Every structure is written in structure tokens, then in C-alpha cells.
Image (cartoon, helix red, strand yellow):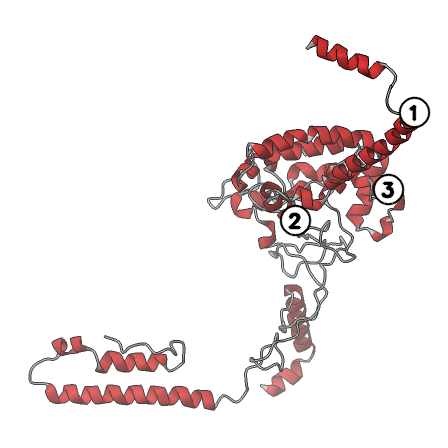
Amino acid sequence: MRDLIRRYWRTLTRPSAYYSLGFLTIGGFIGGVVFWGAFNTALEFTNTETFCTGCHEMRNNPYQELQPTIHFTNRSGVRAKCSDCHVPHDWTNKMARKMQASKEVWGWIFGTIDTRDEFLDKRLELARREWSRLKANDSLECRNCHLYDSMDFTRQSKRGGFAHSTALDGGTKTCIDCHKGIAHRLPNMAEVLP
Amino acid sequence: MTPPRSAYGASPSRAPQKIAGRFSGDPARGRHQRPGKAGSAVALEWMHWLLAFLLVLGAGAARAADPVPHKDPFRGDTAFTDHTRPPPLVGAENRDLRRVRSYAMQPPTVPHAIDNYQIDRYANKCMMCHARTRAGDSQATPISITHYTDREGNFLGDVAPRRYFCDTCHVVQMDVEAKVPNTFEDVDAVVRRMREEARSRAATPQQQQKKK
């Protein structure tokens, strides 16, 4: 094993005897572009709704619940897809989230959530995870679309305008503190402190 | 026992048919016949037939003589064979202004939109603001003490199960034309009118006496 590593290390550190420098640099560049493009395309594919709802646990549970909500059906036809809320948009955090999501692949392989009942039993745990994530990043995924500076309080309801101009403005509360269960049904809230 | 039901089970002539069948075609009837009274039994049977005939006739006549054709306020002049064109949907009023109750016991109407509010065994969206413990933060009207009593009159620690489903009684309002006319009068208006009537009677006693 050690010999093998040593042999490869020697090959890598020695200058090339057969390929020209031009081939290696230009080939390396093109290869890098192709690799990066393929990687990004594959990554973006995992962000599509087709991919997310490709398995029955997502298609039958959260996706069905999303459809009657304002984030799917509304007057203007602008809508959010799964990754808009559940995957961070900037690269580092996105990579971190994608790595975390490998656990979801494990769950899919072993059928952790196979039935509706299993989903409902696990829902509080799943929801808590998302709530704490949004709480920690100050509801970043909400704010990707809903800009505080662009909110017209006079166009909001009296209650909404009041809450947004006080608690949200002061930073004492973030979106998810009040807007739980807007895109999916709520879990058993008996043990959740407001 | 009864004659075989026709396919027109729900037709108005069903009841008379039933009566006729019961009295004429019932084989058990013979057991109740007393011996030596065959003549009166035959007369009785004829009377039943006559009664059934009259009932059928009466039902038909009542339908024919109906002077005002029934008009469904929701369908208007549309024939029942056609589809109506429903009015456009209207959103719930969302002004956050309390409305006057029409009578003291009326469950207050909801002055805001409650679209997609979840009220099930897992969560109650209304109670996230209207619960006793949430009123401080939300400044919403907390549910009244009547919502804590169970059917035996015991006061519970939280909302009673029979009062859990808020939108059974508390409903949103929409700004639409009332399809069914309503002549309801507030009790205050009734009392005021009666008082005014009494006052006008007292003001003109001679006229009242003349009438008598």
C-alpha cells in the first residue's frame, strides 16, 4: 500500500516526459471547465423540484401540503420551489447543506419515512430542525425574496404592519418566529413554546 | 307486504301508494278480521281505497294549484337543467376592526382573513394569538371564560375540547350581496320602537279613546 502511494507521488511530482506543457495547461483548463460545469449542473439538478419530489416521501407529504398555500398558488403566479426555502443560496452554506442532506439519502435508502404515519411521527423533529436553522440565520431564505426595506406597511393588514414595524424592525423577532407552518402543515404544537 | 318500490322512490306520490298498499295488499290483515263482520270489512276496504284515491288526487291538485313557482335565490332564473354562472369569489374582510354583535350571545365575527389557518389535532392557529397566555404579545382578544367550561360546567385549565374548533362559530365576513333576505332586528331597535309607540299612544289619548 505504502509503495503504491509512493509510486503515485513520484509520478505526480516528476515533470511530464510525453505531454507538452501547452497540452497540459490548456487541457487542464478545458478539463477544469468541463468538470466544474458538470459538477454545477448536477448540483443544480438536486435543487430542482423534479429531483425533490422524485421520491414518494417528499411527493406525498410536503409537496402535497405546499400546493394550497400562498407560496404555490397565488394571484401573480410567482412561486417558491423547495430549494428556495430549504437550501441556502450562497455557495459555502449551500455546500454545507448539501453535505447534511447526504443523511437524507441514507433515510431514503432505508425507508425511514415510508408512510404518512411515519412522516407525522417525525414531523416535529423535522420542523424543529428547519425552525432552528432559519432562526439561526435570521430567516435568510425568507429574506431572499421578502425584503424588509421594500415592505409597505400601509399595504399590510393592521396586525401585520404593527408586528413588522415593531418586532421585526427592532430585530427582537425574525420571520420564522411568527410565520411557522405557512408552507406546510404544523406538527403537534402542544410541546412547542411560542 | 308493501308493493314493490318503483324507480321513482322519491316521487311525491310515494306516500299514498304506501297507504294503499298497507291497507289493501296486506296479507296479515285477515287475522284481524272478526268472523261474521265480512260486510263492514268490505265497506272499510272501500273506504280505504277511496281515501287513498283522494290523497293521490289531493297531492296532484296541490301541485297544480301552486300559484307562485319556487324561485331559488342562488339559481335565479336559470333552469335546473342549466349550469349557473357563480359570482366571482370575494376575499374575507381584513380590516382588523371589531364588528358590532347583532345580539348579546352572538359569537363575534372574525375581523381578519384566516385563509389556510390550521385547526386540527396537531395545531390551532387561532390560539397562537387568542390564547390566554398569548394575548400580551399579540394584543388579540383572549378567548372568554366560557371557552374553558366543559359540558358539565367544570372550568378546565385550557380551552375545552368542545370549544376547540374556533371556526365552527367564529366566521369571517365578506362584502357581498345577501342572497337570502333577512328581516332580523336588533333587540335595541325593537325596544326603541315599542317605546316610541307607547309614547305616541300616551301623547294622543283622545284619539285612542275615540277609536275604542
Chain to which mark 3 belongs: A
Question: What's the mark number on residue A148?
Answer: 3
SS at mark 3 in the image: helix
From the viewer's side, name the closer residue of A166 and B155. A166
Type of the residue with mark 3:
Tyr
Query: Where, quadrant-wise, is the C terminus of chain A in this rendering?
Result: top right
Label 1 close to label 2 by CB (< 8 Å): no
Type of the residue with mark 2:
Tyr
- CA separation, marks 3 and 2? 24 Å
SS at mark 2 in the image: loop
Chain to which mark 1 belongs: A
What residue occupies the far right of the structure in this picture? Answer: A22
Residue under pointer 1: A21
Residue under pointer 2: B117
Q: Residue at x 67, y 58 (%)?
A: B101
SS at mark 1 in the image: helix
Q: Is residue A144 left or right of residue B134?
A: right
Q: Find residue B71 and report its image quarter.
A: bottom right
Q: Residue at x 39, y 79 (%)?
A: B8
Question: x, y (%) of residue A92?
Answer: 81, 29
Do the residues marked 3 and 2 share a common chain? no
Q: Residue at x 61, y 42 (%)?
A: A55
Question: Does residue B155 appear anywhere in the picture?
Answer: no
Q: Is residue A162 left or right of residue A111?
A: right
Type of the residue with mark 1:
Leu
Q: Earlier in the sequence, mark 1 or mark 3?
A: 1
From the viewer's side, name the closer residue of B120 and B108. B120
